[in-house]
Amino acid sequence: MHLHIEGTLEPELAFALAARNGVTLPYATEDELRRAYSFSDLQSFLDLYYALMAVLRTEDDFADLAHAYLARAEEQGVRHAEIFFDPQAHTARGVSLGTVIRGLSRALDAAQETYGITTRLIMCFLRDESAASALETFEAARPYLDRITAVGLDSAEVGHPPSKFKEVYALAREAGLKCVAHAGEEGPPAYVWEALDVLGVDRIDHGVRALEDERLVARLVADRIPLTVCPLSNVRLRVIDDLAAHPLPAMLDAGLLVTVNSDDPAYFGGYAHDNFAAVRDALGLDDAALRTLARNSFEASFLDEATRAAYL
Ligand code: HPA
Ligand code: ZN
């Protein structure tokens, strides 16, 4: 449920697409690129994440990107994937929204056929862009809303509180979409409150900083608001010092509906199973805890009630 499709761009595919599209990357080799994957915070990652998107130009590129991700997801035991994409990061480069959605959709449909993996698409607004730009993006997406399940909010968090996007979230809800938002990754608990009370989100993406506010934890527990936690991401972006100190066990103990996710797996050292294995090893989670985490994902998903019930 917390997977940015642009964050699944592995160096091999980045170089292949660069060659296909005549784009020059500022790295000579895949190894040199991989060595750049050392981040001090969210922004240092985002700089590279947006720069590499230059190789994504055509419908085929987006289909190839999503196809490669879904093949890996299948290998990792994923049965259902709710996938973020960042339309503004592409339209700003002259790539149309239709190109992005048609390319992704083609791969998603094929994965259902080939692997039986079900998917949903979540369109994210870049919170460091203006509220007007988010509104423009939402209006441009209206012809494609049958392919979009939810809206989300990502990119540089601090200084861009959820309340900035109140209007576009109201429109999304009116149009029957679900709502999620990144909150409490680098930003304070107040941003999680705003995501809940101003945007009316159905899930919080990350939310690890919610633990700093007891009243907020009680609210998240009482309303069974899912948190899509990304352990390897938290370590790579220095949200958490090291995995052994991750608050995931404390979150489970608090009764939060917490799930394990990979965020930007090409950059952070692992896909879904890799994140489960990492928390098992670093935190000593037993099979019962791992099972709870997996079940939580289905409970938190936007699958219809009957399909969800069948997984639980
Ligand atoms: N946080 C915010 N924005 C993002 C992330 C993230 O973890 N990944 C891709 N865009
Ligand atoms: Zn994310």
Image (cartoon, rainbow, N blue to C red):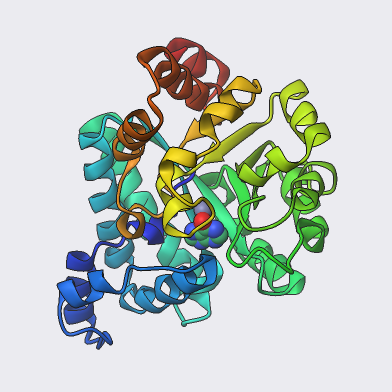
Residue 207 visible, this orientation: no
Q: Quadrant of residue 225?
A: top right
Q: Residue at x 17, y 66 (%)?
A: 12
Q: Relative to 185, does residue 54 appear above or below in the rendering?
A: below
Residue 208 placement: quadrant:
top right
| Residue 152: image location, x then y, percent | 62, 52
In this rendering, the answer to whether 178 lies above or below 58 is above
Specify whether 277 is left or right of 97.
Answer: left
Task: Tally the numbered discs.
Answer: 0
- Residue 3: give x, y in percent of width and height: 44, 48
Q: List x then y, in percent, for residue 38.
A: 35, 68
Q: Is residue 65 above or below residue 137?
A: above
Q: Give the camera-side residue of 94 and 127.
A: 127
Instruction: Report the front residue among 154 and 66.
Output: 154
Identity of the residue drawn at 73% across and 42% down: 212
> With 79 as the anchor, is 249 left or right in this view?
right
Q: Splitting the image into 4 quarters, where does residue 51 fall?
A: bottom left
Q: Residue at (66%, 72%) from the top-left corner?
A: 128
Does the rendering let one see residue 53? Answer: yes
Question: Looking at the image, which residue is at 59% across and 28% down?
Answer: 250
Residue 92 location in percent, x, y? 53, 80
Q: Nearer the viewer, residue 263 or 112?
A: 263
Q: Viewer-proximal residue, 128 or 16?
A: 128
Direction from residue 223 to residue 244 in the image, left or right = left
